[in-house]
Amino acid sequence: MDDYPLLETFLTMLWFFLWVMWLFLLFRVVMDIFRDDELSGWAKAGWLVFCIVLPYLGVLVYVIARGRGMGRRDAQQAKQQEAAVQDYIRKSAGSGTKADEVAKLAELHKSGSLTDEEFEKAKAKVLV
């Protein structure tokens, strides 16, 4: 244990943590480049080359120049995913059983929204 004192262990862990954070930031920037619909293909290619050739400078410049939009694009993507999940749940759950749908049609018929003929056609569609 004398060859690797506690301070050296701490510094090694610190450098490892910083390296992991650097990789996280680099991947986050690359994913943001691909996600941004406002950038043209050439602009995306330019940012990618900049981040690959000069990674530290490229990521730093990207975060300074386009960092404000990163959060907005994340929030927009989260909203789109949430909407897709809710749409999937609605489609999967359906509007209920056939009896529920017929009951809804009966309520509409009682309220006068549907005529007798419309009610019978809609009921036939549901029961088929």
Image (spheres, rainbow, N blue to C red):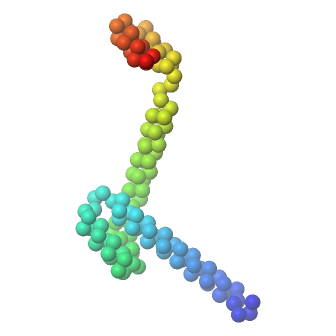
Farthest residue, direction right: 1
Q: Where residue 44 sits in the image (x, y, percent)?
A: 30, 67
Report if residue 31 is visible in the image: yes
Name which residue lies at 39% across and 74% down.
Answer: 59
Residue closer to the observer: 79 or 40: 40
Is 38 left, or right, of 125 in this rendering? left
Residue 88 relative to residue 54: left or right: right
Whole-percent x, y for residue 73 in the image: 38, 56
Residue at left offset 43%, top offset 18%: 128
Q: Residue at x 48, y 73 (%)?
A: 23
| Visible residue check, residue 69 | no
Q: Tell me if residue 83 comes above or below residue 66 in the rendering.
A: above
Residue situated furthest front in the rendering: 128
Instruction: In the rendered view, tell whether residue 29 sits above or below residue 117.
Output: below
How many numbered callouts?
Answer: 0
Q: Quadrant of the N terminus?
A: bottom right
Q: Residue at x 51, y 17 (%)?
A: 99
Which quadrant holds residue 16? bottom right
Residue in front for this viewpoint, 89 or 26: 89
Which residue, as the protein is rendered here, is positioned at the far top?
Answer: 116
Q: Where is 6 relative to 122, above or below?
A: below
Extreme-bottom residue of the structure: 3
- What percent of the width, then of the height, locates residue 55? 39, 78
Q: Quadrant of residue 56?
A: bottom left
Left or right relative to 79: residue 21: right
Q: Which is more toward the observer, 5 or 87?
A: 87
Q: Nearer the viewer, residue 56 or 44?
A: 44
Q: Quadrant of residue 39?
A: bottom left
Coordinates of residue 45 in the picture (x, y in percent): 29, 70
